Amino acid sequence: MPTSVAQLNLDWLRRVRWFVWLAQSLLVLWAGVGLGIRLQGAWLAALLIFGFASNALLLLWQRRGGRATENVVLAVMLFDVLLHTAVFSLSGGPFNPFTALYLVNVALGTLVLSRWRQWVQLVGCLLGFGSLFLLERWAPAAWQLPNHAELMRMHLAGMLVAFVVASAFIVASMERVLTALRRRDAELFEARQHALRNEKLAALTTLAAGAAHELATPLGTIAIASRELERALASLDVPAPAKEDAALVRSQVQRCRDILSRMSASSGELAAEGFSTMSVGEWVQLALVDLHGAERVTGPAQTSLRVRGPKVAMAQALSSLVRNGLQAARSGVELRAREEAGSLVLEIADDGAGVDAQVLARLGEPFFTTRPPGQGMGLGVFLARTLADQLGGALQFESIEGRGTVARFALPLAPVGGA
């Protein structure tokens, strides 16, 4: 169950309160012992202990399943205003430099409360600060509060400390907001990138379906005609190159049909394929079937880890990555599988020349390829990455020029006992 915003704000407010009450305690101790100012020590100690105890009770309430809401956050902040007012009234009243904490409360309320609650918090702070001027007059004569000279001495001596403390709390609050904004911007950017990839995939699907539909009939006609031509030439006394040309036409037509079929299948036709669970060994075995150069592929040693997804699409994606590795490798490709944070990470490592940072950044763009013309469409990595994203995983690349490239295909592990 996701954590609510109110819960996060209450957690943060609770941590801030420890520092606030610690700062209040140090101020009272410093004023009474360091400056020798007359204070109502017993009452102040009781109020400070009550402040720490209230935070401990809040922590206990949360751990026992207390449900945080904005009203709870507002109640805690108003309680602090009331308690701070009591402490200030016994330690200098409006002369207490730590009355700047009222501004901290206003700033915190602006960050964590909705609009009408912000105004309630602001009015509470104004009433608290304003009451200090009245409480000073209504205090019993027996309390022997600090005189004017002592108050001024405490005010001047504590202004710098209060300014530093209040500034630190405000800066920490602003940094929290900026961090949240940066995180949100990063999430929005990732969402936009994901949406863009989906749009590209949708366009690719439309292109592939249209191409397959429009070209299927003429290619079929050419295939039939070339087969009949090949048969006719076989019974005639014609030069061998003519027969070879007819065979070449037929083979190239078949290649075109295979390409269209692969584009159509990989770019979206498999979306309706059912999900099933398979081991890494089964996945690799499916990917290497009929793959030219499969004898140059080694591993993985770990084959019992299991993943779940569309078998054919996953096999095609892995086959495409292995094929790329074989074409770049000097000797061969090594497959390595491991479990990492609840995911299967399957690495496809080659010992080729590697690629530079500029090419590495473009891997996965549709129709981008480093192969010579006619040897690839630049769709394999794009479709593999799209599949990984759709299955809740990721596809990443790492390359060192002169030492090779590693493709990391990460997918969530299948639940234990999943079919």
Image: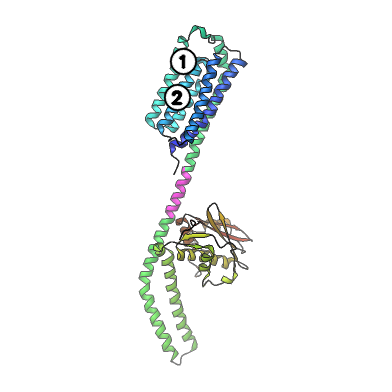
Q: Which residue is mark 2?
A: 79
Could you tell me which residue is drawn at 41 percent across and 34 percent down? Answer: 69
Left of 67 or right of it: where is 147? Answer: right
Q: Main secondary structure of the magenta part?
A: helix
Q: Secondary structure at mark 2?
A: helix
Could you tell me which residue is drawn at 50 percent across and 36 percent down? Answer: 176
Kind of residue indicated by mark 1: Leu
Left of 94 or right of it: where is 268? Answer: left
Residue 248, x across and y down, in percent: 47, 80
Q: Mark number for residue 78? A: none
Can residue 205 be seen by looking at this rendering?
yes
Residue 82, x across and y down, in percent: 45, 21
Given contact means CB atoms under 8 Å apart, are the residues at marks 1 and 2 in contact? no
Of all residues, the one furthest to the bottom in this rendering is 237
Q: CA distance from mark 1 to mark 2?
A: 16 Å
Q: Is residue 142 magenta?
A: no
Between 88 and 249, which is closer to the camera in this rendering?
Answer: 88
Residue 249, x across and y down, in percent: 44, 80
Q: Is residue 191 magenta?
A: yes
In the rendered image, the quadrant that contains the C terminus is bottom left
Coloured how?
rainbow
In the image, residue 145 above or below residue 369 = above
Could you tell me which residue is drawn at 48 percent across and 21 percent down? Answer: 83
- Total labels drawn: 2
Q: Quadrant of residue 33?
A: top right
Q: Which residues are magenta?
A: 184-196
Can residue 160 be seen by looking at this rendering?
no
Of all residues, the one furthest to the right in this rendering is 402
**Residue mark closest to the camera, 1 vs 2:** 2
Q: Which residue is mark 1?
A: 132
